Every structure is written in structure tokens, then in C-alpha cells.
Image (cartoon, rainbow, N blue to C red):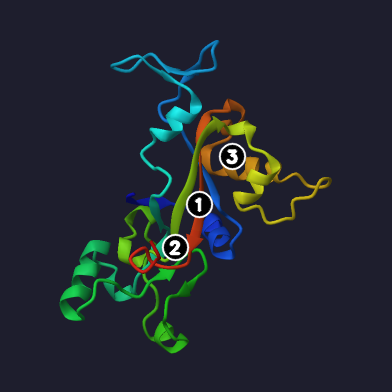
């Protein structure tokens, strides 16, 4: 088992916090072709590779049992705007004695363990991209329970709900797959759905805790 970072957008962070999201799909790279036997095939790499979807899923970097600490857009205190996130962590380690700092999460515009008075006295600083979030500032931990390889458009209604859909999954009425298609297009581009790439679908449980405080 390994601990790995994973990036989520603000709407998906809200879905994680609300308990609506227990799956995520990421594009399989590089993309394979599929042969007459149903095997996934990569012919352009240094070696000829082929295999069934289950074997390819088992060979992914993220595996069942791994823990993922969520990286999201955030802000530190305004007084630290001139410092990198790593430098802020080092400052708190040196001057205060612990490797974490008060964090404003862009997904909910709240601050972690700060009173309104302190917020007003020390307003949040500049917005920082999710990729720059340090491990100590993360507040969500996902433990992977299943890894699958499939076509994007093979997603079913139940899986679309697990991706974080906000409206009920009903036999009739709005189809959660249409919601997921819209989200996927917003993130990956106008033609991203029509391309129908192979994706890796990760199922996970969620704890609203920093990974160093979450259960193993």
C-alpha cells in the first residue's frame, strides 16, 4: 500500500465532503487499441504490450489499498503571500513547532479551525493551485477499494451517481450520466466525451481527515 496525492476540482471536493463522491475516472495514458480478442494493445512503445482489462487495471500505479490525499485549491494567510507553500510549512515548523498552517479552502471559502475574529484579523491570501497543496494542508483522505479499466461512455447510472451527482438516481427522469458527461466535458474539453477514451475508474472510501490522522 502506498500514499499518493490526487487532484480534485472545487465541485468534486464539495461532493467528497458531502459524501456523494466515491468514484473518480482518469484517462488511461497512453491510450491503447483493442484487438479482435478484446485485449488492450499498445504497439508504439519500446515493447509490444497487450492484456485483458483486469490485468491492465492491476498494473496501474494506483492500486486497491492505496491511500490518496486530496490536493485542492487553497489559500494561506495573506502575510505569507511572498512564500512558497514549502517555505510556509518550514516557517511553521521552525517558529511554532509543527508542520501545518491555517488553510483557507477555495471549495468552501471556510478556514480550518479558525474563528471569525482571526479570519478578519488575518485575511486569506492569494489563491494557490491545487498542485501546490502540501500534504499537511490536505483535509480529505480516500482509500482505494477497486480499480477498473473501461470505456468512458460505459459508465452506468449508479457509477455516475458515485461520481458525485447531486440529483437522485431515478429509473425515470434526469439521467445522472448526462450530468457526468457535462462535468467531464467542462474538465477535459469540448470533444472529450465523444472521443470515448479508455479510463481508469477508481472506487474509494472517504475520510474527512488529513492522511496522517486517517485510519489505516
Between the C-alphas of marks 1 and 3, the distance is 23 Å
Q: Residue furthest right?
A: 172
> To which residue does mark 1 refer?
204
Q: Secondary structure at mark 3?
A: helix
Task: Estimate the x, y position of residue 23 in percent, counting from the top left.
Answer: 55, 48
Q: Secondary structure at mark 1?
A: strand
* Disc marking residue 43: none
Between the C-alphas of marks 2 and 3, the distance is 25 Å
> Is residue 28 depicted above or below 204 in this figure?
above
* 12 horizontally vs 176: left or right: left
Q: Quadrant of residue 157?
A: top right
User: Crowding at label 2, few (<14), some or many (≥20) Cα neighbours within 10 Å?
Assistant: many
* Disc marking residue 140: 2
Residue at image point 58% right, 28% down:
196
* Disc marking residue 185: 3
Mark closest to the chain's N terminus, 2 or 3? 2
User: Crowding at label 3, few (<14), some or many (≥20) Cα neighbours within 10 Å?
Assistant: some
Q: Residue furthest bottom?
A: 117
Foreground label between 1 and 3: 1
Q: Is residue 127 or residue 143 the one in the foreground?
A: 143
Amino acid at each position: 500500500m502506498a500514499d499518493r496525492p490526487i487532484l480534485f476540482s472545487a465541485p468534486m471536493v464539495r461532493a467528497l465532503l458531502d459524501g456523494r463522491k466515491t468514484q473518480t475516472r482518469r484517462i488511461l495514458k497512453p491510450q491503447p487499441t483493442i484487438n479482435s480478442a478484446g485485449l488492450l494493445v499498445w504497439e508504439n512503445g519500446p515493447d509490444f504490450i497487450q492484456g485483458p482489462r483486469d490485468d491492465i487495471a492491476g498494473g496501474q500505479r494506483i492500486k486497491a489499498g492505496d491511500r490518496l490525499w486530496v490536493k485542492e485549491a487553497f489559500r494561506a494567510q495573506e502575510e505569507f503571500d511572498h512564500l512558497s507553500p514549502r517555505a510556509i510549512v518550514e516557517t511553521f515548523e521552525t517558529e511554532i513547532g509543527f508542520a501545518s498552517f491555517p488553510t483557507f479552502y477555495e471549495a468552501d471559502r471556510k478556514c480550518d479551525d479558525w474563528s471569525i475574529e482571526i479570519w478578519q484579523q488575518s485575511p486569506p491570501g492569494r489563491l494557490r493551485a491545487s498542485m501546490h497543496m502540501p500534504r499537511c494542508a490536505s483535509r480529505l483522505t480516500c482509500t482505494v477499494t477497486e480499480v477498473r479499466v473501461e470505456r468512458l461512455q460505459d459508465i452506468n447510472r449508479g457509477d455516475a451517481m458515485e461520481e458525485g451527482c447531486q440529483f437522485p438516481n431515478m429509473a425515470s427522469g434526469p439521467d445522472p450520466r448526462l450530468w457526468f458527461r457535462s462535468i467531464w466535458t467542462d474538465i477535459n474539453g469540448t470533444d472529450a466525451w465523444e472521443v470515448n477514451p479508455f479510463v481508469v475508474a477508481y472506487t474509494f472510501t472517504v475520510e474527512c481527515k488529513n492522511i496522517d490522522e486517517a485510519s489505516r
